[in-house]
Image: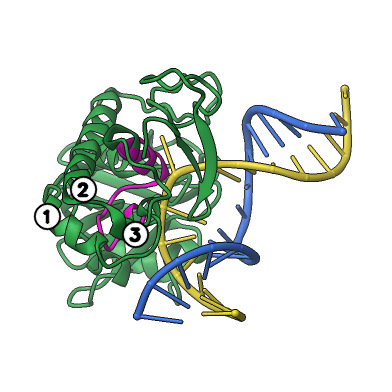
Chain colours: A green, B blue, C yellow
Amino acid sequence: VPELPEVEHARRVLGEWLGAATLEGVAARGGRLLGPGASAGGVVRALSGRRVCAVERRGKWLRLGLDRGAVFSHLGMTGKWVVAALDDAALPHERVRLDVRQGRRRRSVRYTDPRGFGRFLVVGEGEPPPTAWSTLGPDPLLDGVDAPALHGELASRRQAVKAALLDQTLLAGLGNIQATEALYHARIDPRRPARTLSRAEVARLARGIGRTLADTLLRDDGATITYVAEAGASNPFAIYGHQGEPCPGCARPLQKVVVAGRGTVFCARCQR
DNA sequence: AACGGAACCTGAAAGC
DNA sequence: TGCTTTCAGGTTCCGT
């Protein structure tokens, strides 16, 4: 259930596990994950023997640059990259397996995804990247958030500001949690039509985005990422998942509504 | 053209 | 206890 910070963490670990590695053994389960028209056999043929030159992230997408072609990986709602021993059996819901060699060292890197909303798209040399990748807006971490430019974009949209923040062509990497948290930090009601935000409010929003991403990145930098939905995980967010509890700012109970089809927590007093 | 809602899946938690 | 319903940190397609 990853947003930008968790995907950034995945980029870092994949850089370690796959950097300058040769793909010696590849296995994939067919299906939607591989994209329309792609087959497991085709993926195995395209990747076997390839060398990983770069591991990059834009928004919620990962790109594995190869000596010929590339792989675009999206984690969907429940995707995860994990490292295993070469003789480990398939993990639950394992969909892709990359057995690699880095110099003398060998590893087995697995992609698991229970709900299967993720993507593992193999693109050959000279083929264009997936549309979803090439239409991504600025990445807040790589490009920063340009408040005046964001204000200009929002000025032409009637939709709720939270819906706009979830549009990956506007900004790449925000999801339901980060959008909820950014709007809280910026003290803006998530239901406000995007075009009604003043320049000063968009400037606050830009800072709110930076703040929630930095907070979450700091937490995710440890070895293990705990997801709110997982049993026994404590919720580290300011308001996400805290509906009914007192607002950290004013102590009034936090509300929960649906905006753009997604559960949205906010404080009716602090966020206007 | 833009927007809201359903669809795509599985599993954990809440409800009865 | 056990069955049913709801909901989940995402994206895309479809109808209005």
Side (left or right) of C7 relative to A64: right
- Give the number of the mark in front: 1 or 3: 1
- As shown in the figure, which amino acid type bears the numbered disc 1? Pro
The part of the image, by quadrant, that contains residue A10 is top left
Residue designated by label 3: A167
Q: Which residue is mark 2?
A: A202
Q: CA distance from mark 1 to mark 2?
A: 8 Å
User: Going from the N terminus, do you reach mark 1 or mark 3 first?
Assistant: 1
Point out residue A195 in the picture as x, y percentages from the top left corner: 29, 60
Q: Quadrant of the C terminus of chain A?
A: top left
Secondary structure under the numbered disc 2 in the rendered image? helix
- Residue drawn 30% across the image and 24% down it: A223
Q: Secondary structure at mark 1?
A: helix
Q: How many marks?
A: 3
Give amino acid for label 3.
Answer: Asp
Question: In the displayed structure, does residue A85 sit left or right of residue A141?
Answer: right
Is residue A156 placed above or below A226 in the rendered structure? below
- Marked residue chain, label 2: A
Q: Which mark is residue A10?
A: none
Viewer-closest of A144 and A19: A144
- Which badge, 1 or 2, comes first in the chain's sequence? 1
Are dots 1 and 3 on a single chain? yes
- Start and end of the magenta stretch? A165-183
Kindly identify which numbered label has been placed on residue A148: 1
Compare residues A256 and A178 and report the one nearer the observer: A256
Quarter of the figure that contains the N terminus of chain A: top left
Three-letter residue code for mark 2: Val
Q: Is there a contact, CB below 8 Å, between mark 1 and mark 2?
A: yes
Alpha carbons under labels 1 and 3: distance apart: 18 Å
Q: Residues within 10 Å of mark 1 (few under 14, many from 20)?
A: some
Q: Chain of mark 3?
A: A
